Amino acid sequence: MKKILVFTILLFSFGFALGQSKIIKANPLGLAFGIANAGFEFKTAENQSLTVSGISYNISEINGAGAGAEYRFYLAEEDLKGWHAGPSIGFFSLKDDSNNSATVFSIAVETGHQ
């Protein structure tokens, strides 16, 4: 699974737009630190989108994986560009070599610019 995720991230590199209704995102710089993440954003309505993402974490003796979703309301006239705000939900699970583990579930409101 990790090899497929890493390959996908390297293949798509930073991110690019597919038309004006879909964007594939990745963070290849994170690979240098043991973090691989990628996301897919697609238009759902005028000035609105849904982003789904996944992450794999492997630093020192700590390993983990997670997934999330974010619904965005774009404040500008252009789709998938500019300032946005909206709700997000996420799940993340970590485990170390000593069998200690933690699970995080989050619900938040996010803002940003793309």
Image (cartoon, grey):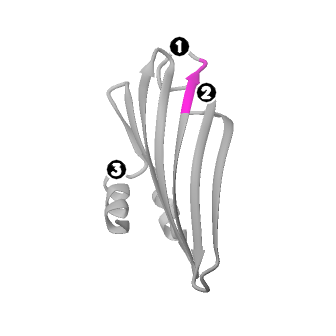
Image-based side of 20 in relation to 71, left or right: left
What's the distance in space between the residues labelled 1 and 3, CA to CA?
27 Å
| Quarter that holds the C terminus | top right
Q: Which residue is mark 3?
A: 12
For mark 1, give the secondary structure.
loop
- Amino acid carrying mark 2 in the image: His
Q: Which residue is denoted by mark 1 in the rendering?
A: 77
The magenta segment is 71-75
**Please, what secondary structure does the residue beneath circle 3 have?**
helix
**The N terminus: image quadrant:** bottom left
The first of marks 1 and 3 along the sequence is 3
Kindly indicate whether the residue at mark 1 contacts the one at mark 2 (C-beta within 8 angstroms): no
Q: CA distance from mark 2 to mark 3?
A: 24 Å
Q: Is residue 25 left or right of residue 101?
A: left
The residue pinned by badge 2 equals 84
Residue 99 to residue 38: above or below: below
